[in-house]
């Protein structure tokens, strides 16, 4: 069994360990919920204060030009690109994930006008299901959403399918899907592939280029650490950039926004997907988060992520054998950067853990989620989290009456 | 002719004059561009720092519950409501103006399924024109946009018109339309009325209730002072709240977001219009801006706004007679809170004024725009701005070669 000393040794030799200092994390807290909301970095704090006090406070409206606010969607998109294996001018930062999915679904449906099915995973994050259904209804040309068990995808790929939209890492189980294989099979069926990278970006290495992904979108507030309600990002493969249309167009996606033309003429490339300006404060927080990411090798992140999740699973199974069902795949090739443990009293466990400084979260009906973000989670954190988990279970702290009624937690 | 001393006296007796201290404005700057981007208030600065350092930095994911992030869209909507004459639970803060227009147009079209025309003003802000056209194309049931000269509205009101979307205060000329009269005429034709309050909110008193407005939306970064890329807001009349559908639904508009249901069940009232979370930092800035507005009587704002714009127009006509064409109505009942002066060399004038500390902006082809926000613009500012304008013209500072090529300015 791994000891705490061994965990400390792992931290000492960890190439990423110094990055923890970049985050404003209370050292007494074990934060295993970066898969829901990443922590504040010193660079994000600095960038937001700069945007607030200097760019807005002093520069005022002049900062649209002088502080480069106007170009932020592409500029930050270019900085996001390496996190998903994209090139320059292939990623844009805008809106939120749900709106970007709406736009990319809208674009995909127009590229396949003779096809009328959106295939998605019935276990997808519900916002994805809602917006898919919303776009199907809105387009009123008989488009329908077929929400399937994703393991049966091949049976549903036929010449009616316009686009397949899947989330690459399952938000409940943490299962990672086969980016390249699924994309290839969708293409064989003549359909387009739209990936949701909400739980992948900054969590696992991604290569949209070699996987020949058509479209992707993600959020920035989870592993990317850009803060609550941070903007989304969208990827459009170069081969589609001049083919697509922003179905929800706005002035900031126009080729010349200040020409005030009555008709929308799209900006070249991904810029046309910008509708209106994202919050400049939110963009500043993202910029600060990316300052940290610029120093990080995703292969190192992946190596540590798997080591952390392996350690957590092993320690849980050793210390409280049979107590939990591990819903996350043990196979590395199918694992994201979180571990989901199923337990009938999971809600109380998560609440009781929070009381002793271990932050995870709960997802109905019985899933305890623990995110392991290699930029700031240490091996000793994993060790200590399991010790506290064992203590909670031994004390029965999770079985208090107040935990019988679930209150919504994020 | 009004003297500078008289302007100082006006400031001394101005009931709003103390509010200027709430804004972080360089005293050497005369900021007449709050109609594009309002300045930073001390309360917004404080609220953003609190959201950044404490809510996000320390509270982390727990702040969704503990800091009330989850309820912000309605809570801030309720605080916005008095600025437009709405009641509680009638306004929601979300997205950006363009997306909210998309949602409200989508909802209106569904409420009038037998009608297929969106009427709008061809001089409308171009993002409004783009999203109207976008929604018409997207719905693919033969909806078309008819962009008219707004003075000919009555001729275009017939039983094909589903919804009329107009901007209440023209972004170029500053002309204010007849909220109540137009709404009534649109209703007589059986159509729905959607108002864009981008240049009205915080600029002029609004009463959506007595005007029987169906839908309205606006932004918060202009006269409201919520910062660059601040969120939008939407109003839905109580009579429509249970009738509408969010055509771009997302998980935060679901009645129980944490039940993770596969089918969208809308939250009651305006909350269903929330798709995903706006930036918490942007919402904090808005909250701080509203702290200032809570202390303000809109009748006082209007009185001072008209006095400021009257003074500006009078001084310009006295000091440089015949130099400009005043594009803003002289009739108070048709004036917003900005003055538009037409001049062939307008671009150079705005650039040269910026060099001497007077910030206005330019809109093609020949409009110099000056916004007069009564919360922080003083009567002496108006006087000094005109003095500097006269000086620019006398020196010919606006005729420099570099101003011949227009660079986009916000």
Image (tube, coloured by chain):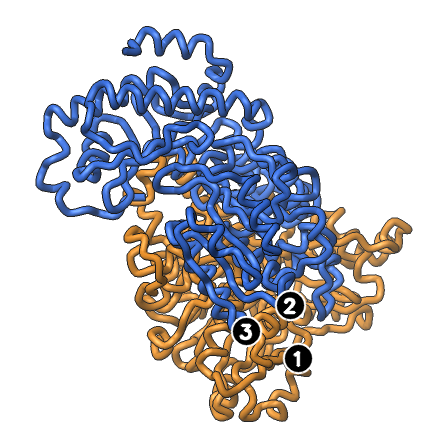
Chain colours: A blue, B orange
Q: At which x and y percent is residue B159?
A: 54, 92
Determine whether A32 is above or below B343 in the image: above
Q: Earlier in the sequence, mark 2 or mark 1?
A: 2
Q: CA distance from mark 2 to mark 3?
A: 21 Å
Residue at 50% in and 72% down: B106
| A251 left or right, relative to A278 | right
User: Which of the image's four quarters has the C terminus of chain A?
Assistant: top left
Looking at the rendered structure, whether the residues under marks 2 and 1 are on a common chain is answered as yes
Residue A291, image x and y in percent?
57, 28
Whether the residues at callouts 2 and 1 have beta carbons within 8 Å, the answer is no
Dot 2 crowding, Cα within 10 Å, few <14, some 14–19, many 20+: many
| Chain under disc 1 | B
**Mark 1 sits on what residue?**
B147
The circle drawn on residue A141 is 3
Name the foreground residue: A240 vs A409.
A240
At 57% from the left edge and 61% from the top edge, which residue is drawn? A159
- Choose top left, top right, bottom left or bottom right for residue B164: bottom right
User: Which residue is labeled 2 in the image?
Assistant: B130
Closest to the observer: A386 or A164?
A164
């Amino acid at each position: 069994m791994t000891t705490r000393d061994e965990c400390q040794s792992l931290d000492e030799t960890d190439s990423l360990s110094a990055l923890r200092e970049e985050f404003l994390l209370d050292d007494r807290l074990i934060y295993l919920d970066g898969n829901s909301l990443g922590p504040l970095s010193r660079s994000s704090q600095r960038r937001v204060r700069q945007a607030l006090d200097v760019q807005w406070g002093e520069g005022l409206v002049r900062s649209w030009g002088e502080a480069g606010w106007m170009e932020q969607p592409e500029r930050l998109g270019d900085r996001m690109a390496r996190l998903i294996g994209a090139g320059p001018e292939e990623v844009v930062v805008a809106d939120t994930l749900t709106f970007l999915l709406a736009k990319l679904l809208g674009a995909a449906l127009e590229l396949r006008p003779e096809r009328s099915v959106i295939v998605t995973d019935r276990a997808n994050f519900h916002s994805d299901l809602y917006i898919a259904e919303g776009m199907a209804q809105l387009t009123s040309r008989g488009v329908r959403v077929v929400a399937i068990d994703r393991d049966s995808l091949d049976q549903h790929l036929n010449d009616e399918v316009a686009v397949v939209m899947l989330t690459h890492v399952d938000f409940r189980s943490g299962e990672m899907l086969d980016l390249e294989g699924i994309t290839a099979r969708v293409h064989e069926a003549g359909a387009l592939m739209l990936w949701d990278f909400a739980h992948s970006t900054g969590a696992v290495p991604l290569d949209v280029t070699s996987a020949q992904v058509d479209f992707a979108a993600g959020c920035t507030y989870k592993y990317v650490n850009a803060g609550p309600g941070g903007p989304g990002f969208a990827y459009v493969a170069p081969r589609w950039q001049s083919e697509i249309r922003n179905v929800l167009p706005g002035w900031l996606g126009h080729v010349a926004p200040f020409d005030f033309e009555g008709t929308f003429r799209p900006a070249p490339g991904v810029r046309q997907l910008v509708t209106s300006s994202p919050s400049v404060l939110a963009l500043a927080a993202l910029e600060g988060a990316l300052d940290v990411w610029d120093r990080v090798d995703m292969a190192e992140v992946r190596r540590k992520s798997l080591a952390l999740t392996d350690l957590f699973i092993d320690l849980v199974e050793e210390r409280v054998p049979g107590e939990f069902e591990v819903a996350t795949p043990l196979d590395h090739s199918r694992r994201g950067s979180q571990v989901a443990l199923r337990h009938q009293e999971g809600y109380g466990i998560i609440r009781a853990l929070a009381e002793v400084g271990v932050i995870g979260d709960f997802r109905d009906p019985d899933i305890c989620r623990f995110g392991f973000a290699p930029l700031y989670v240490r091996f000793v954190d994993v060790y200590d989290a399991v010790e506290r988990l064992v203590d909670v279970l031994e004390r029965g702290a999770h079985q208090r009456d107040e935990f019988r009624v679930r209150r919504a937690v994020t």
